[in-house]
Image (cartoon, helix red, strand yellow):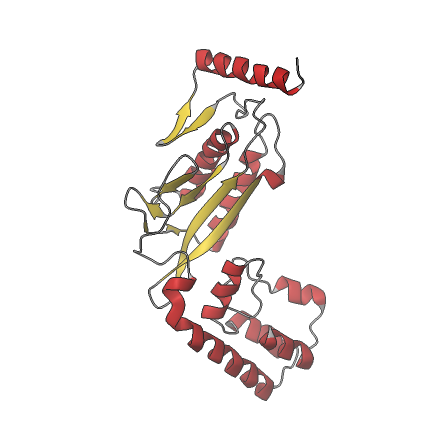
Amino acid sequence: MLACGLVDLICDLPEDVSDSALHDPPIGCISDYNNDRDSIKTTMIDAHVCERCQRLLAEYRIDKDALDAVNQVLHFVSSQTQAYAKEVFRFVIDQQIEPDEDLYVEYKGKTTGKPEDKIPKEALEYAVAFLNCEGGKILWGIRHPDHVVDGVKLNRKKRDLLQQRISGNLHQILPPISSTDYRFRTYPVRSLDGTPIRDLLVLELSVAPGDPTCLYNSANGSVWVKTPGGTQSLNDDQISSELRKRSLKRLDRFGI
């Protein structure tokens, strides 16, 4: 925050220009978009001014001495937090993570083929399954069954495409859900010294519990429920049984 303040004092960037420079997910640059503690820690551990932002500041005639002063602050922050890299970051390559898988947490390892094609389909299946149970989250880039971080390889273009496809798939769920019912996030995978590994990510989809009186399904009518080992696709008889159970819950809700 101090480094950003120094830049603002010496270099009056227009708001639209400043917004265009934001990095999401964070890369350690002063232009990172930070909305929680994890992203703030990510920025601190690798604190710097990226080349793109240096060029942008140069266009607005930032003084070299001022930029050097900013870099000194950032170097101090980074050097003091590097020692805590393993504790600070959630996802370090080849390191085991907690907690174990259960009904609410699912891990998926490296995705073969094109992850931007496969993961949105899995996201739809798990979102429906979580909605039909008690909510939960799935993480891609965590090797099964030993829960070791191996990451998913995605460049910026593929990452944007994947996010668009996931959002499109989830907005086709019936009954419709709100964008506040789920959250998709990406986390950089780091080496042991805290350095981010280029284009290697862990992806997380969190889904809130659905209405227990509703049975959620995909646009083509497929229905899944969450099981301890993954998901289960329901056949017609099972769907009918679930609909009856949920209808009774609806009647109970209204005291009928």
Q: Position of residue 196 (x, y in %)?
A: 40, 63
Tell me where residue 51 appears, x and y as whole percent. Answer: 51, 72
Q: Is residue 101 visible?
A: yes
Say above or below: 176 vs 60.
above
The percent coordinates of residue 163 (x first, y second) are 52, 45
Residue at image point 59% right, 28% down: 211
- Residue 195 seen in this snapshot: no
In the displayed orientation, state which residue is furthest to the left. 146
180, above or below 44, in the image: above
Q: Along the line of sight, which residue is nearer the eye, 246 or 233?
A: 246
Compare residues 199 and 147 and report the one nearer the observer. Answer: 147
Placement of the N terminus among the 4 image quadrants: bottom right
Which of the 4 quarters of the picture holds residue 61? Answer: bottom right
The answer to whether residue 61 is left or right of residue 150 is: right
Identify the residue shown where x is 56% and y is 29%: 173
Q: Residue at x 30, y 42 (%)?
A: 144
| The image quarter in which residue 32 lies | bottom right
